[in-house]
Amino acid sequence: MERLPLATLLSGQVLVGGSNCGELMRISDRYIGKQVLLGTLYAVLVLGVVLVLGNLFKQVQPLLVDKGAPPELVLRFVLSVLPESLKYTIPWGFLSAVLLVFGRLSADHEITAFRVAGVSLVRLAAPVFVIGLGLCLVSLWLNINVVPNSRASSKRLLYMQAVRDPASLLKPGMIQGDFKGDGEGVQKLLIEGKSSRTVDGKSVQWLDGFHLYVLPKSKTEDLTYVHATGAALKTDSEKGKLWLQLDDAYFETRNPSGKVQLFFAGASPLVFDLKNPGKMKANAMSNEQIRTEISENPKIAPQALVKMQAEIMTRYSFSMACLSFAFVAVPLGMQTSRRDSSRGLILSLIIGTGYFLVTMLADQVKSADLATVVLWAPNVICIVLGIILFRRVRFR
């Protein structure tokens, strides 16, 4: 940290004027910029540990415990979801860093010294806006390219593992869900045990006590239940197919009116398509994929259409968070007193929480135009409020 040159300048040993004024600006820019960058990095790391890991372990727990996935798959899953955390931690960390840095400068009366030397508050805060603009570009790249790809890859990991070793994801006594097979609805699978057996001279994975529930997607569709005393499990890695050869199979279908149809078979095959993970959600699609889906699918439900359009707008509005926070964080940080060093952290929590809560309201609206207003409102509020606070601090 350049404490000695800054302390010398602030003590009045260098007269401001001519080349000395330019030297003062260069030193102040380097000093404030370095403090904000280091503070942002530190805050991102801390927020990542405090806010992200709890939610991360919540997502990993079903893989590691419920599905019994191998550690390699869990590690790859963790790495694939980490980029999404930066969507929140970068602007939140930047906000915390600016509040703390300018709070300390104000508490140490360094800002007062700069103002006495004739340096305006806007010029003093210039490094903050430059860094905020740079972080906006980084956030834009993350939100448009990296985060959607990471979400899509985390979903594909399960299907890749299912193709390579489906038995590793089947745990006896635990309900396995959301399989998509041959155009059917959501399916729930339960097995009582698993072992290795020899069938037709080949070693296969054997599932004991096979139970499959095909849940209807609507009230007009049938509910199907399949039971078998056992099933031989095989995969076709090239085609991404999972084959189940059922032994002593029992099929039961119940229609919406309550009529039941039964069918018994000594042996029956079931096929699941594991190569296609199903339809991606909008947050796992790129902007181009979303626009293509909207243009090529005229039957999209109105609410789904709003969510797709809002997802694109969310990526742009979130990317502006750092620059918006710069407007409000600088004047708020300057109002921090020496005896209230925790105020910056409290303010960052309040502002960051309010910002992201308001943007989440866009998922509840039913109009694309209203969703756009809701998504951009926090940025506009921060900028307008920051300009007002700048004027008040300037004439204080």
Image: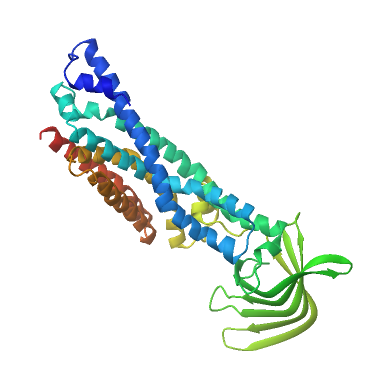
Name the outermost residue toward the bottom: 259
Could you tell me if residue 42 is visible in this image?
yes
Against 192, is 183 above or below? above
Against 325, is 60 above or below? below
Locate residue 379, reporting x and y percent: 30, 45
Q: Is residue 161 left or right of residue 23?
A: right
Locate residue 372, reporting x and y percent: 35, 51
Against 166, is 287 above or below? above
Q: Residue at x 33, y 29 (%)?
A: 33
Q: Residue at x 63, y 66 (%)?
A: 180
Locate residue 126, reporting x and y percent: 28, 28
Could you tell me if residue 285 is visible in this image?
no
Q: Residue at x 59, y 54 (%)?
A: 74
Name the outermost residue toward the top: 18
Q: Is residue 307 left or right of residue 280?
A: left
Q: How many marks?
A: 0
Q: Is residue 69 left or right of residue 292?
A: right
Towards the viewer: 323 or 63: 63
Colouring scheme applied when the structure was drawn: rainbow
The quadrant in which the N terminus is found is: top left
Indicate the quadrant where residue 255 lies: bottom right
Locate residue 392, reporting x and y percent: 13, 38
Indicate the quadrant where residue 125 lies: top left
Against 175, is 47 above or below? above
Indicate the quadrant where residue 245 lies: bottom right
The quadrant in which the C terminus is found is: top left
